[in-house]
């Protein structure tokens, strides 16, 4: 049976990402994998995460990454350094993972990867987005900035506009317990945040520091605790 699986914010946690993929046992021929953005910053291996996404796509896996606010910030920081001549932009962990001191040294293929990322994916049964939707707009999917940055929008949801679709997002870290509580009301609320603050490795005892995946086909959550060797947070 084919599955549609979504994974929350990865934030440079490559080893944890790989362990989660192994746990969910992704199938190349049948499964679709949707990644909700924020592949870079904070964790130790931003480069490795992007490389892994590209590698999976090249191997024929149906991997659909969308844009997060941290990819957007990387594009803005790269522009600031290369065009405006500003210095010391971007996350230090990101630059360390590439072995560079300045974003002017970043290989252009990683900038191109970020530029090509869509702001959302819309399927018949769900919308995959990084942060959420601004329902004060006639069509929330046209507000690119809000798709990347919005918070505190649950009380404004237009269920008539959704027409039964679910919204799966990240951006705002929740504990494992909070995600499971949201999941218990998923059919009614039609919203699920699967950002479990994976880069917060020192907060695993408090329910953060996990990478979360959601199999929307079978209505199943997966959690993988942070296993990075060197996590700053």
Image: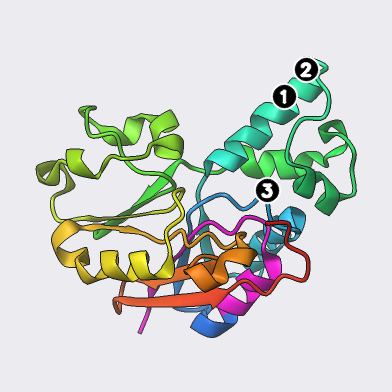
Callout 2 environment at 10 Å: few (<14), some (14 to 19), or many (20+)? few
Looking at marks 3 and 1 on the same chain, the residue that comes earlier in the sequence is marked by 3
Q: Please, what secondary structure does the residue beneath circle 3 have?
A: loop
Q: Please, what secondary structure does the residue beneath circle 2 have?
A: loop
Q: Residue furthest front?
A: 206
Image: magenta residue range:
1-21
Q: Is residue 60 above or below residue 103?
A: below
Q: Which mark is residue 41?
A: 3
- Asked whether the residues under the numbered discs 2 and 3 touch, taking CB atoms below 8 Å apart as contact, a structural biologist would say no
Q: Residue furthest left?
A: 160
Is 219 on the left or on the right of 223, as rendered? left
Find disc 2 in the rendering and name its residue.
Answer: 83
Would you say residue 9 sits in the magenta stretch? yes
Is 34 on the left or on the right of 191, as rendered? right
Foreground pick, 163 / 97:
97
Looking at marks 2 and 3 on the same chain, the residue that comes earlier in the sequence is marked by 3
- Asked whether the residues under the numbered discs 1 and 2 touch, taking CB atoms below 8 Å apart as contact, a structural biologist would say yes
Q: Which mark is residue 79?
A: 1
Residue 225 pos. (x, y %) = 57, 75
Question: How many numbered marks are there?
Answer: 3
Residue drawn at the location 84% of the way across and 49% of the way down: 96
Q: Quadrant of residue 103?
A: top right
State the separation of the CA atoms marked 1 and 2: 5 Å
In the rendered image, is residue 180 in sight?
A: yes
């Amino acid at each position: 049976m084919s599955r549609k699986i979504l994974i929350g914010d990865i934030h440079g946690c490559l080893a944890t990402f790989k362990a989660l993929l192994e746990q969910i046992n992704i199938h190349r021929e049948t499964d679709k994998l949707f990644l909700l953005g924020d592949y870079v910053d904070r964790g130790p291996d931003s480069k490795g995460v992007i490389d892994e996404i590209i590698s999976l796509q090249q191997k024929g896996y149906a991997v659909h990454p969308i844009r997060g606010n941290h990819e957007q910030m990387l594009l803005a920081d790269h522009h600031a350094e290369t065009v405006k001549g500003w210095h010391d932009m971007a996350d230090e962990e990101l630059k360390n993972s590439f072995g560079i001191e300045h974003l002017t040294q970043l290989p252009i293929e990683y900038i191109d990867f970020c530029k090509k990322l869509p702001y959302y994916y819309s399927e018949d049964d769900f919308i995959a987005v990084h942060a959420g939707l601004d329902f004060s707009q006639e069509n929330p999917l046209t507000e690119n900035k809000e798709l990347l940055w919005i918070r505190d929008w649950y009380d404004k949801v237009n269920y008539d506009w959704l027409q039964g679709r679910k919204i799966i997002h990240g951006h705002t870290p929740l504990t494992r317990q909070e995600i499971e509580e949201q999941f218990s009301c998923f059919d009614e609320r039609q919203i699920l945040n699967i950002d479990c603050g994976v880069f917060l490795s020192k907060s695993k005892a408090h329910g953060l520091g996990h990478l979360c995946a959601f199999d929307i086909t079978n209505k199943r959550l997966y959690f993988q605790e942070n296993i990075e060797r060197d996590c700053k947070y």
